[in-house]
Amino acid sequence: MRWLRRLLGGGRVQLDPERQQALLRDVQYRYGARAQVGFPEQVEAVSGMLDGDDGLIVAARIVSQVAEEAHTDLQAQAHEIHLRTGRRLLVHRRNYRPLWKEAGQALRWPLIALPSGFHPYAQVAAAVTVVGGRASRLDRLTDPNPLVTRVFEVLDLTTAGWEYGRVRVDTDATTLVDRLITSAGQVLAAMDDPPRLPPPVRELMRRNNTLDVHDPTGPQTVGRFNLGAALRERLLV
């Protein structure tokens, strides 16, 4: 694995764990739903903060932590539904779509109220932007395979929420999905042996329908988004 060879014998990488922790805390507590500025401005600010290799490590941690927290939340929801109704729901991380198809109306979208406080349209959108923009550095710092898996996992959770979980498709939501797709494509392109695209991505690629995109602050439609086309354009290269 190229990333491991570089870690063991490649160019020396200088990292500062204390700076990473300070960056993580700053991003976590200054931004998100409580911030007084809009999500686009937050994404720009957080992306600018996460500079250098330390910032890239923090961005990767945010993506991975969000995916872990969302999975834990869905497991807890499935368990609660089983206790309440006797209905057993399977939670598979590689493909959340069957879970949402079966129980979407009974599930709460986990990305909007994570224990960490990271918001999908603020810190998460910024983190995936940083990960993709510096994908060529990842194999000097970490194994990119589990990271790109987590990016796809957040993408799966978001698009399944649109389809089955009553998550509103607005410009903030489509910006997140666009950045997730772009980042996944950039990481895959930087890998020597990229993994296969996960089942939910392959399923959505076969579609060609467009979705109405709404203004975040009102009911009006401000555009259209073709998810299948965006996936094909960025990932089939």
Image (cartoon, rainbow, N blue to C red):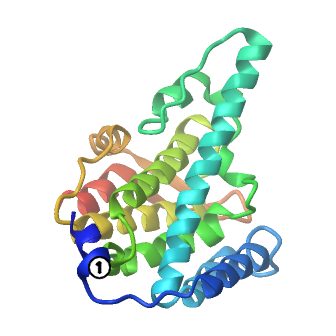
Query: Is 175 or 86 nearer to us in this picture?
Result: 86
Q: How far across and down, in percent of the image, does residue 44 sit?
A: 58, 85
x 60%, y 89%: residue: 49
Above or below, 34 relative to 98:
below
Query: Is 73 or 61 nearer to us in this picture?
Result: 61
Which residue is at the far front? Answer: 8
Q: How far across and down, in percent of the image, does residue 68 sit?
A: 59, 49
Q: Which residue is mark 1?
A: 136
- Please tell me in which quadrant of the rendered image residue 48 appears: bottom right
User: In the image, is 3 to the left or to the right of 59?
Assistant: left
Above or below, 56 relative to 106:
below
Identify the secondary structure beneath mark 1: helix
Above or below, 166 relative to 182:
above
Q: Decide: few, some or many residues near mark 1? Use Cα within 10 Å; few <14, some 14-19, many ≥20.
A: some
Amino acid under disc 1: Ser
Q: How far across and down, in percent of the image, does residue 32 sit?
A: 74, 70
x 21%, y 69%: residue: 2
x 59%, y 20%: residue: 89
Which residue is at the far top? Answer: 86
- Image quarter (top left, top right, bottom left or bottom right) of the C terminus: bottom left
User: In the image, is 25 to the left or to the right of 3?
Assistant: right
